[in-house]
Image (spheres, grey):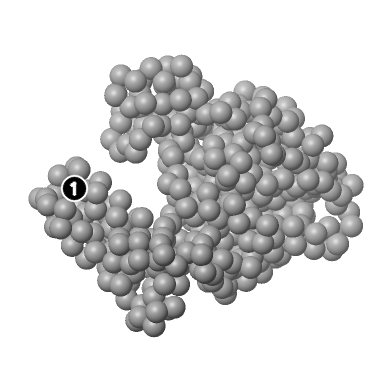
Amino acid sequence: MKDSARIDTAQEIFAKAYTEVLRGKPADSSVTSEIRNRRYMGSSDRRAVTGMIWNTFRSMAKALWYLREHGIKVTAEEIFNTVLQEKYKDSEEGMSLWAKYECPQELFADFAGKEKSLLYMNNQAETDLHINFAKTDINDMLSYFKEQGISADVLPYSLDGIRLGKRVNLQALPAFKDGLFWVQDEGSQIISRLVAENIKDGAKVLDLCAGAGGKTLSLYDMKKGRGVSFTACDVAAARLKELDKRADTVGFAGIKTKVLPLSYEPFITDNAESFDVVLVDAPCSGTGTWRRSPDAKWRTTKADCEKYEKMQSDILPKAAKFVKKGGKLFYVTCSLRTAENEMQTQKFLNDNPDFAPLNTAKIFTLPKCPDGFVFKEYYAYLLPEIWNTDGFFIAAFVKN
């Protein structure tokens, strides 16, 4: 394809993806299907076209600011051309901060003090894999990817995985089908390791908002053979079905799954004070994962964030009921918003005097941490610009 044809194709597909985003739907499925339908496109054409599309989403705040400042009607075509031609370049000195930091205007105030994270999340995310140590090891997997012509390196902070040097259709690889690894950002691996350090042999562990179970699999992998029992719950049956499928693929047969109603009853009554460790990987705005899905920030509204805050404040007290005396409760989000993190955990402590905060510097250890990282009282942030991961928050409590 000629460059002009690539540009026209990218603009056309972006317009369709942008329409989906305005409807609150992810752009990736639209982009993938549109690319797939154009069978005449070669691999280099596909890379060029998708690169332009995702770059447009990554620079959309600047484009929106420019169009509004110049009184130009906001359309998909105008956004695309503004980014492609970098029309805002000469105006950056007077540009609003929300546009400079590539954040939706209505959400920018939520990131006070985390502007560096916003900038860093505008970079493309790399592909991290968690190695299934029940079937292989890191050195064997490094050799495997080298044989496939795929560069790979050991993750710098996690003990559990590798990072690929390029995007790969992993599902087509025999090693994926054989369950030798699963896809998991290093930040999620680190969070799992921090929790795992607090799981004693023979403990009962509850992953209350397990979803498709990435952290559940990681915890199981680190604690297999130590008499630890794992129960993974979620209100979405489809997510737990995916967890069951993934656990079967990687050969983890000891994970119990249970679909819960929104009230969590009668599971709460039947299992009150039954678990040594409870992990709440809470539903959240996902603002820490924006580098992975650059369109997600444009699907996230203030109302969405407030909805998640309400869910979190409802889930934490319920989760507390499952914790044994002397047991630990961990609260995790992949959000960088204070309202979903410190404010939620402080409210929990105020309302639940039978729980006390745990000093994260004492209960969490890692073989290596990046410069600039510090544990703060009872919580910690994995900030993208420091860890080169998605953004995470983790807080720890003990039941008196």
| Residue 42 pos. (x, y %) | 15, 44
**Mark 1 belongs to which amino acid?**
Asp
Nearest the viewer among 200 and 127 is: 127
Q: Residue at the spot x=18%, y=62% of the render?
A: 8
Residue 29 visible: no
Q: Secondary structure at mark 1?
A: helix
Residue 204 seen in render: yes
Residue 268 vs residue 301: left or right? right
Front position in the image: 49 or 329: 49
Residue 261: x and y, percent?
59, 63
| Residue pictured at 34% horizontal, 38% vertical | 167
Horizontal side of residue 359 vs 141, given as left or right: right
Relative to 307, say whether 116 is above or below. Answer: above
Give above or below for 17 relative to 278.
below
Residue 350 in picture, x, y percent from top left: 86, 62
**Above or below, 231 relative to 288:** above
The residue drawn where x is 83% and y is 58% is 349
Which residue in the structure is indicated by mark 1? 45
Q: Nearer the viewer, residue 45 or 212?
A: 45
Residue 104's spot in the image, x, y percent?
51, 68
Is 392 above or below relative to 366? below
